[in-house]
Amino acid sequence: MALNLAQHEQRALPKPGQLSGWFTTPAILLGLLFTLGPIVVITVFSFMSQPANGSGVDLIFSTKGYEQFLFQEDFYGNRGFDGRYLSAFWLSFVQAFFTTFASIAIAFPVAIWMATKTERTQNVLLMLVTIPFWTNLLVRTYAWIILLSEDGTVNTVLGWFGIEPQVLLYNSYATLISLIFSFLPFAILPMYSSLAGFDFRLAEAAYDLGARKLDVIRKILWPAVSGGVLSAIALCFVPAFGSYLQPVLLGGGKVLMVGNLIADQYGQARNWPFGAALSVIILALTLLGAWALLTWAKRSSTKVSLAV
Amino acid sequence: MSSGDYFISSQAQRRKELLVNHASKTFTSAEGTAVRALDDVTLSVGLGEFFVMLGPSGCGKTTLLRSIAGLEVLDKGEIYLGDLALNPLPPYRRPVNTVFQSYALFPHLSVYENIAFGLRMDKMPRRLINARVYEMLELVQLADVGGRKPNQLSGGQQQRVALARALAKSPKVLLLDEPLSALDLKLRRGMQGELKRIQRETGITFVFVTHDQEEALSLGDQIAVFENGKPAQIGTPQEIYKHPVNRFVADFIGDTNFLDSTLDRGIVDIGAVPFQVESDHRGGKVTLAVRPENIFVTPNGKLAGTLTEFTYMGTDLRATVALSDGQTLRLRISPPFPELRPGGEVRLDIPPDAIAVVD
């Protein structure tokens, strides 16, 4: 009886500062609404049809959005294969690949260097890495225009050494540079965090057992940081693949990429279903990639988190 | 030296393997002050010897060990292994291996792979690696855990793996940096015996760092007691215990009575009673060190005192005796126990070789 009473009291009086689980419901609902909501809307839109006039969608089921991705109907109604959009995907893929590769290649030594500093220095360095986040992406991208334009900073400096002004802007190199600049922190942070807890005495033990510097990096440091590298891949590749601002502003929008292709469908082309279908395709590819990454990580028992 | 010391090999007879010659090393601490971790250290370790470096933390023993491994660079001095100068060699070229205090097992590798790591670095053929790893697992009695990861092992097992990993490469010298300090007392005793056995079986020279004097006494063939960056005394456990060269060593090893006294031509006085001592100290005011178990209660002892208190400990009696000059002596009396009465007079005797002049 006494025991029952105690149990009853425990239920009636939660620990100080503790609320019932039901109190989290609004937050969960709000979270679901803003994460799943847009995805549901986009998916539904992708199966609707394009209205005859204006933008938006007609509530009539259609798979035309998806068909358009690979096939085109000519003036006479003949369906033929259309590789333009696939090549836009391929270009975006290549660009995202180089962005991710370069970001990680730069971030690896930076992360190691950061992790070996004293705790105070590490905090300062961590702040420096996150400084770009304090400025708007648009402003940061415009800054590259100032740096790279014909009479910009880079050409001015080159001029001091008697080098003719170079065309640096409005090509894929300019896009790539600004993409790497934008995503470098996303590569450094997860790699740094996986190294921050690294016991550098393990490196000493490896040296002691006959390992050279390169062996230590490959056999001891790399396994520790590989989880962070996977996170960095996920965090850099996916946004770089769908990047819009940099290709448009610095690449001059001359080349069709996934980002501006989708933007065009919602803007000038007024083809919302196709734009939605393209988004769903990207989402599906991303999920596939994430699944592959996690499966591989599980098999090789590498710790990976798909967020910072 | 007493007859009990007959089996002690003298410094001169040992075949020297590892020689540390005038090694100095200064660190800059976090506050910016210079710390002399090694202060002109010269010592030698004999072939196949179990050499213990003992001292409180910050006395330089670990710095010396890391310098031998190549993980620290000496400011001055040389380290020789036989005829081979170690200083110019990077850690991976030195024929020495280390058992780290934190074990430093590679967490992503299995026990097997941890032990095989050094052999793979040496490009040993796969078949030989396999045989060697199993030999090592056998040696440390862990034959059935080769497939596990380090975090699936107990502290004692991790310790054995660290030992097996370091021994796998058959180093000329094995360096052990307080390897047992993370283990509980019982495991520690077991591992001490284990280490001694492995050292005998392999014949490898062990250099063992510890701050535990009991561990040092039970393991070491030779002990170097470190004080402020240099060895205060190097000798066999018996030498160190019976004939400490200074107060620091006498205090650090075992339990000791310190007595103020005066020395005059080989005679000291304890409680106004003269005792003969072996000492090359000059005369004058001195400090004597006398172990509690070397003071005997006998009816015709020449030293008189008053028993102030005593405690029965089972295997021995701990007693405190006040001398006529006001100094006190702590005694550890072995059975058969004499009749004792608190406040009563006791007569004591101290064998001459049990009195060490330490200051």
Image (cartoon, coloured by chain):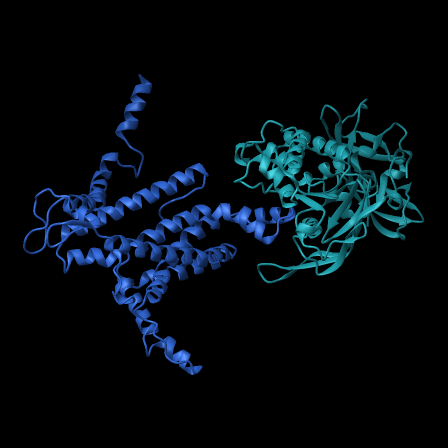
Chain colours: A blue, B cyan
Q: Is residue B27 above or below residue A215?
A: below
* Residue visible at 14% across and 46% down in the picture: A64
In the image: residue A275, left or right of residue A222? left
Report whether residue B256 is seen: yes
Residue extending furthest toward the right? B265
Q: Nearer the viewer, residue A86 or B309?
A: A86
Q: Is residue A226 left or right of residue B98?
A: left
Is residue B60 visible in this depiction of the protein? Answer: no
Can you give x and y, in whole percent of width and height, for residue B88 in the image? 72, 58
- Residue drawn 76% across and 32% down? B201
| Frontmost residue, A139 versus B334 | A139
Give percent across and percent down for residue B15: 85, 44
Q: Position of residue B266 (x, y in %)?
A: 93, 46
Q: Nearer the viewer, residue B154 or A296?
A: A296
Residue in front for this viewpoint, B23 or A229: A229
Outermost residue toward the top?
Answer: A1
Residue at 34% in and 67% down: A174
Q: Position of residue A104 (x, y in %)?
A: 43, 55
Tell me: residue A172, above or below residue B165: below
Q: Where does the N terminus of chain A fall, quadrant-wise?
A: top left
Note whether A117 is above or below A285 in the view shown: below
Picture layout, residue B193 above or below residue A220: above
The count of marks equals 0
